[in-house]
Amino acid sequence: MNFSKLKQIIACLIILIFNPIILKAELVEKIIGVIGEKVYTLRDMETLASDFGLKLEKGNNPFEDELKRESFLKEIWSKFVEREILEKEAQRLGLGPKNEEVQKLYEDVRRRYGLSNEEMENELKKQNFTPEGYKRYLRAQLQKARIIEVFISSRIKPSESELMAYYEAHGDRYKNPLRIRVSQIFISFSGRSEEEALKMIRRVFYELKEGKPFEEVAKEYSEDPSARFGGDIGYVESEEVDPYIWEEIKDLQIGEISLPIRSKQGIHIFQVTDREEEKAIPFNEVRSRVLEDWWKETIEQEYAKWLEEMKRKYKVRDFL
């Protein structure tokens, strides 16, 4: 045997031994999975990507690209298996839907967003869908809704004790958040140097420490529109305030004044004038929300169980 060729063969074997991902990639080129007796290949999965709005983004790192590719194939296979099962069960049970229903839903979506046919196709393209692929997606969603209605939602009904247990287990969802009423004095960086702004805020802070009412100081110095109201900006919650500022003011008690706080725009001093502490909302006031959350979570769990049962029924196997 040619010595040079022998070296090439040995080199290839070493690469395969020490790079199992490459070996695995070669295998999945042939078979991705099986449903019943039907075999699905890598080529099948790649042509299905536009049915699920998926696209493989490649980078500059071959190792990371291979991992992305494997994850990409798994996601397509998972969605494809679900769609095939829904189609088989919907046909078996006579749940449809008819092509006319799917087309109507497609048109409803288009009209809801005020799009022409061409604009709709362009929007779908941005989301990695083809029009026909999106219609297949809509068809599967209709089938899923009908399967859930037949096998799940019609068979489950929570008791009051179950709802109460859910409410207690997810208490953080059913609370009024902490709200604090604050006033502020704001000195802007705009139109002056940072040194001038710092000098001004020191004067403001000194007057506050000397006992001058916050409202008077705000009216005299603050450059925020709230100055004419004595700096009062009303009640705020954590989601409405810069996270850094919130951390500095959330624990202040009524009447307390913050240290000067720097932001991109300037320097702030806050005073808390009222606090509404976080507290649980009584169950009877949020029962409808609890019921809705319980339904969503339970249906997801029961649907996942049903899907696993169907995978066994239709002898689904994957080789990823």
Image (spheres, rainbow, N blue to C red):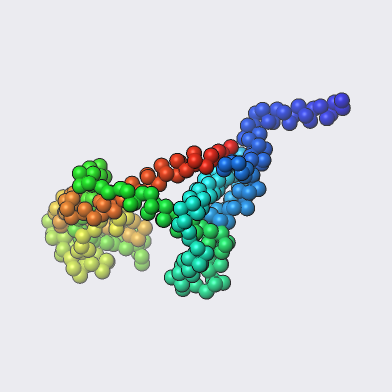
Residue occupying image coordinates x 17% and y 53%: 284
Q: Residue at x 65, y 37 (%)?
A: 27
Of residues 225 and 313, which is closer to you in this image?
313
Residue 121: quarter of image: bottom right
Q: Residue 249, relative to residue 67: is it above or below?
A: below
Q: Residue at x 48, y 68 (%)?
A: 104
- Quick one: quadrant of the C terminus? top right
Q: Is residue 281 left or right of residue 19?
A: left
- Is residue 293 shown left or right of residue 78? left
Q: Which residue is more in the foreground, 201 or 138?
A: 138
Q: Quadrant of the N terminus?
A: top right
In the picture as drawn, the residue positioned furthest to the right comes out as: 2
Q: Residue at x 45, y 44 (%)?
A: 307
Residue 73 higher or lower than 130, as above or below: above
| Count of marks placed on residues | 0
Q: Position of residue 170 (x, y in %)?
A: 26, 45
- Across and down, in percent, residue 146 comes to 41, 56
Q: Position of residue 86 (x, y in %)?
A: 48, 51
Relative placement, left or right, of 314 versus 272 is right
Query: For residue 61, what is the image quadrant?
Result: top right
Q: Does any portion of residue 79 appear in the rendered image?
A: no
